[in-house]
Amino acid sequence: MRTLQSGGILMALVLAAWLVISPAANAYTVYVTNEKDNTVSIIDSAKLEVVKTVKIGQRPRGIALSKDHRWLLICASDDNTVQVYDTQTMKFVKSLPSGQDPELFILHPDGNPLYIANEEDNLVTVVDIERDAVLGEIPVGVEPEGMGISPDGKLLVTTSETTNMAHFIETATNKIVDNVLVDSRPRFAEFTADGTHVWVSSEIGGTVAVIETKTRKIATKIAFKIPGVPQDSIQPVG
């Protein structure tokens, strides 16, 4: 469940996978990947209506807009590719190279390259989205998924669900500079706006680790207790 606040209206969207939001005036276009339907739903946030549903590749997961909002990028996990669609027409543009089972990805703050977590290969693939070229492959832990990048674009973090680690990667060299052990099944990684910390959610561990970017030490762990909900049912993801 994701909750979005806009113009005083609270909206709750139940997602099969992930969403991205494209702002336009005071409304938003919301793109949602539907993993089991092999579709993307396009939602008008002002009307709270699905305005279009588009058939795409198999088992769509991660989704992102290009920096100029010209393209919509989607991990077609069972097709082992990243598909690109024109946001104006939702016509297929091209496929980007990827490893096996791309789960999530993240763009460099400059808009290029794209960093893809390939779960079956235990690799992060670095792709130039304009030239459709693989720039590098970075071996990481088992079943990489979460992807976060610092605001200055210098540091990438990917989480490995089975190794239970957050891997810190220097983007200038595509080398791992540190590995931080977190709780079981880390899913997402996200930097704070000032880049001083990265937050990593652990689904089975039921915690969020707040890691200092400079020292790569865990500053604190956030746990959740919800009245009436068994502890093993509290599973933070996004």
Image (cartoon, grey):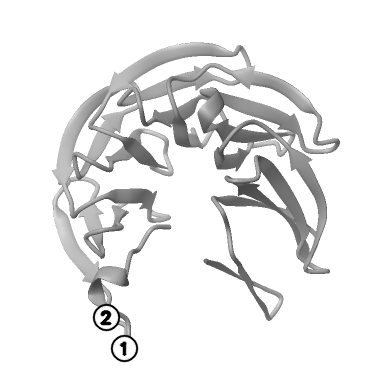
Which residue does the image show at 45% across and 36% down from the upper left?
103
Question: Does the residue at mark 2 contact the one at mark 1 (Cβ under 8 Å)?
Answer: yes
The one nearer the camera, 100 or 28, is 100
Q: Is residue 129 above or below residue 196?
A: above
- Which amino acid lies under the numbered mark 1 shown in the image of this protein? Pro
Alpha carbon distance from label 2 to label 1: 7 Å
Q: Residue at x 25, y 65 (%)?
A: 206
- Front-lying residue, 126 or 149: 126
* Residue 207 in which image quadrant: bottom left
Residue at 69% from the left image edge and 79% from the top image edge:
9
* Residue 199 found in image quarter: bottom left
Residue 225: horizontal and vertical position, in percent? Answer: 27, 80
List the residue tagged with mark 2: 225
Q: Is residue 64 left or right of residue 177?
A: right
Q: Residues within 10 Å of mark 1 (few under 14, many from 20)?
A: few
Q: Which mark is residue 189?
A: none
Going by the picture, which residue comes out furthest to the bottom? 227
The residue under label 2 is which amino acid type? Answer: Lys
Task: Please tell me whether mark 1 sits on a helix, a strand or a loop.
Answer: loop
Residue 166: percent from the left, percent from the top?
24, 42
Q: Which residue is more in the foreground, 92 or 64?
A: 92
Report the residue marked by disc 1.
227
